[in-house]
Image (tube, helix red, strand yellow):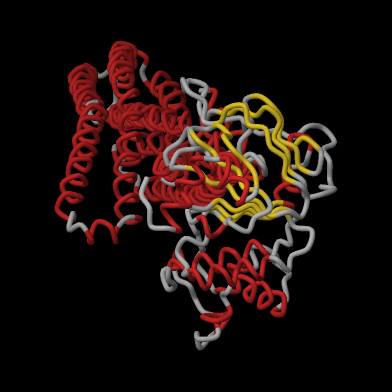
Amino acid sequence: MKSLKKLFSLLGPYRISIIAACILVAVETSFELIIPTMMADLIDNGVANGDVKYMFIKGGQMAFCALLALATGLAYARFAARAAYGWGARIREKEYEKLQEYAFSNIDKFETSSLVTRMTSDITVMQNTINNGLRPLVRAPVMLILGLLFSFSMNAELAVVFLVLTPLLGIVLFTIVRHVAPMYSVLQKTVDRLNGVVEENVRAIRTVKAFVRGEYEEEKFDSVNDDLSSVATKTNRTAVLNLPFFQATMYICVLSLMFFGGSMVLAGTLQVGELTGFLSYVMQVLNSMMMLSNVFLLLTRSLASAVRIGTVLDEEPSLKERENPLQNVPSSSVEFRNVSFRYSKKAKEKTLADINLKIAPGTTVGILGGTGSGKTTLVQLIDRLYDVDSGEVLVGGENVKDYSLRVLRDAVGMVLQKNLLFSGTIRDNLRWGNKDASDDELWAACDIAGASEFIHRFPAGLDTDLGQGGVNVSGGQKQRLCIARALLKKPKIIIFDDSTSAVDSATERSIREGLKKLEGVTKIFIAQRISTVMEADCIFILDNGRLVASGSHDTLLESSQIYREIYDSQMKGGTF
């Protein structure tokens, strides 16, 4: 319930709509409950006495009450829809804002498919709670209380039937809700798995087709789809048990009232109109209890979704800024002091251990090492995508934890190992680096990145649509556009994480020559090809998360066995 309370606190301006909807439901219910009394009066005084005028007057009053009930019902629908979908939009917005605050370590706790489900399916469940549950939630108690009062006022002896059957219905409802509550959590987790399979297959569709694994993927989807169908069937099969129980109780109640009420009519202690009106109240009261049971099921399901959404909203970002953080990066120097890091506190081995290095401002450095040696992890600590476990990372002579995250990351440009472009034009993607960049600035960055050459070949130039994920350009073209995008930030430090692996050697050489023109910018290259870093001022060698050697190309050829083996394998055709 704590999660539900937190989400309801996000109603904001829609609280008024909720209150208005509740009032309208109460008014609508009151009009409906007056009608049986009028009907009883019409039968006992109008029909019994053959008074046609009286029947028309009472009939008109009943029609007027029905029209008022209809009008308030329509008004309720408008306010409820506004509250439900407005509230859902606010939750979705809040959840998305929270995701933007997450550090990588926070995001690592959730699967992508699960986050998508929490922002779509789970929020839809919450919207349905308002849209479909608010009316019976208000209507049922009002109808139950007023119906019991009216029925007791008409005939207290017959109304005793309610007191016998109501506890039975309560026990049935409690039992069903208790069993179905955990099933809804399992259901949403199964939806997560289904979304995960779909998302993975769509993202890797080229690989699936290249390896002719379509049938395998279909079998995997069928398996998780069958699981979802099975869980949903079991859950709903349990949830709908309340319907036959409530209907059976209703019919028992009606039969009992017909028997005892008929006996009282024959005995002359009850009029036919009173019995008819009483039966109307009975049906309304029992229907209200059935609606209330459905509301409990809705709330039970919404509680499971609320907990899942609340988990995202309650997750505290692992990276926090100190009070009054530094708002300026004075220089482009980088220093690691006794840095150790592991991705999970449960990990037995450190990803990086006892790293000490210094990078002077404006220099070019290279980082080499085998797969899994910690190269990418090392550079991700510079712009504080992760926090170190021990030691310090300094940029411009200051600990990265002392900077505003926005300021620090604006000062560090990173071209990721996995090149990612967004839907839209080339211009739109480049302006991620600088939203106010002029065309001259865009072309200048593209010239350095070696992207101008292929952009000019497109008829639309910078306005060429890249498609979803940049599907309309090759891997090498993606890399060059990502380099241009990073350059437009005009960063003090720029990191290239194996970001020229898909371009030919001539283009790579041209890019390196263009980067030399950037004065005062520290350039860090992570590379597999030794030719990429041979001309660097300093080269760092990582092995199993440790810094094992550093120096210039010539120095490392003489002093580092690892570097010499890499050089021989790539430049002389040797082998490891």
Residue 355 visible (yes or no): yes
Residue 288 vs residue 35, the one in the foreground: 288
Residue 526 vs residue 402, the one in the foreground: 526
**Residue 537 higher or lower than 454, as above or below:** above
**Residue 440 higher or lower than 82, as above or below:** below
Which residue is at 36% across, 18% downward?
155
The residue most toward the bottom is: 459
Q: Position of residue 15 (x, y in %)?
A: 63, 40
Residue 320 vs residue 556, the one in the foreground: 556
Q: Where is residue 299 in the image (x, y as percent from the top left)?
A: 42, 30
Which residue is at 17% across, 19% downward?
259
In screen coordinates, is 234 left or right of 360? left
Q: Position of residue 274 (x, y in %)?
A: 32, 28
**Residue 484 higher or lower than 320, as above or below:** below
Which residue is at 59% across, 53% downward?
525
Q: In which quarter of the image is residue 233?
A: top left
Q: Position of residue 151 (x, y in %)?
A: 38, 23
**Residue 290 higher or lower than 156, as above or below:** below
Residue 159 vs residue 78, the one in the foreground: 78
Residue 138 visible (yes or no): no
